[in-house]
Image: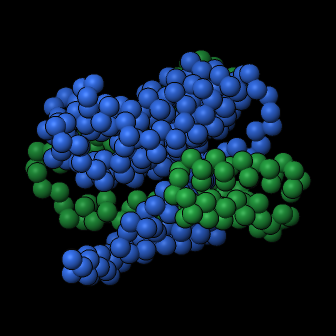
Amino acid sequence: MILSFGQSILIIMVIAVITFALRAAPFILFSRSGKTPKVITYLGNVLPPAVMGMLILYCLRNVSVVDSPHGLPELIAVATVVALHLWRKNNLLSILGGTIFYMVLVQFVFI
Amino acid sequence: MKQAIKAAFPATIPVLLGYLSIGIAFGLLFEKAGYNFIWAFFMSFIIYAGAMQFIAVSFFYGGIGLVQIAIMTLVINFRHIFYGLSFLDKFNEMGIKKWYMAFALTDETYSLLCGMDPPEGIAKKKFFLSVAMLDQSYWVLGSVIGSLAGSLITFDTTGMDFAMTALFTVIFIDQWKSYSTHIPALTGLGCTLAALLIFGHGNLVIPSMCLIVLALMLGRKQIEKRIVEISEKEDMIP
């Protein structure tokens, strides 16, 4: 542990409080009025797929396409996850399969 | 309640598999940062946010201020603010338990609850609560197993954080299939790529989210038209 006990607890509490506040917000804001503004419903509807796309790229943000191996391990591994998931539609298989394959790629193939 | 848990279990098996594998990966990474299974248990118990906890591991190496952590949390988990909107009425019927349901509304629990009804003879409230509690128990269990295994096994974990990328890719594919229009998904990818090119990889999430919300608001008419058109077409299929 690099940080102290107190600092670590503080980090966890900050994340916990904000995460819960976000998840509880709709119930605090809209529970009484009964009517949710249409724009909120619309955003709630279309944001999830957009956010997932964002999160995929966020995970890959430090990959360099300029320097060797030009993001090839990531590209191959993501393609593997997509292929596995389209084939079997099994979360465990897609996630574990893709991850193990990626670990092999970065540890043994693209050194 | 016992009956409700039994009835809910089969529906939660995909999440069981997903959360165990991701939870184990998180536990291992957290253990590598110097935090044992008690920490993993505590964090998974009171935060309960898969992606966020993964990203949070890097906070424990120091050098990141609490304000920045707060902003990161706000931005990364901002999507959760919309999940509750689908369950305003349903959770409000659950009394005090609605606050646990709100707390437990992760990506996976949200998608499970969206697409299912309890079997006959099982009250919906108990069924929902069972699904939410089972899902969280898988997450807590996975992260504890991961951190325990981390202190026993000392293999090279390089590349294991790819599990997170894989998780998002899997959810992305599932959503791609279930949405009648792919514009939102493509907007997410496009805006993030644009933000990456303009603002660089150091501070990606906030500009990306701003661009995404802006683009979705500008394209609202087009996107809503497509959603309506396609749902009308689907209505015509007997």
Q: Give the residue drawn at x 49%, y 56%.
A: B171
Say which of A68 and B66 sits in front: A68
* Image coordinates for residue B15, horizontal then vertical, percent: 45, 43
Q: Residue furthest left?
A: A33
Q: Quadrant of residue A36?
A: bottom left
Which quadrant of the figure has residue B232? bottom left
Residue at 48%, 49% (x, y): give it: B76
Instruction: Give the residue at x 51% y 58%.
Output: A89
Chain A, which colour? Answer: green
Q: How is the image coloured?
A: by chain
- Is residue A57 visible to us here? no
The answer to whether B154 is drawn above or below residue B216 in the figure is above
Q: Quadrant of the N terminus of chain A?
A: top right
Count of numbered badges drawn on the protein = 0
**Residue B119 rendering spot, x and y as whole percentages:** 23, 43
- Location of residue A37 in the rendering, given as x and y in whole percent from the top left corner: 18, 61
Q: Which chain is blue?
A: B
Q: Is residue A23 left or right of residue B98?
A: right
Residue closest to the eye, B104 or B173: B173
User: Can residue B2 be seen here?
Assistant: yes
On the rendered structure, is B134 left or right of B234?
right
Q: Position of residue B38 (x, y in %)?
A: 56, 18
Q: On the picture, is B83 further left or further right than B212?
A: left
A74 in relation to B190, above or below: above
Q: Residue at x 58, y 71 (%)?
A: B194
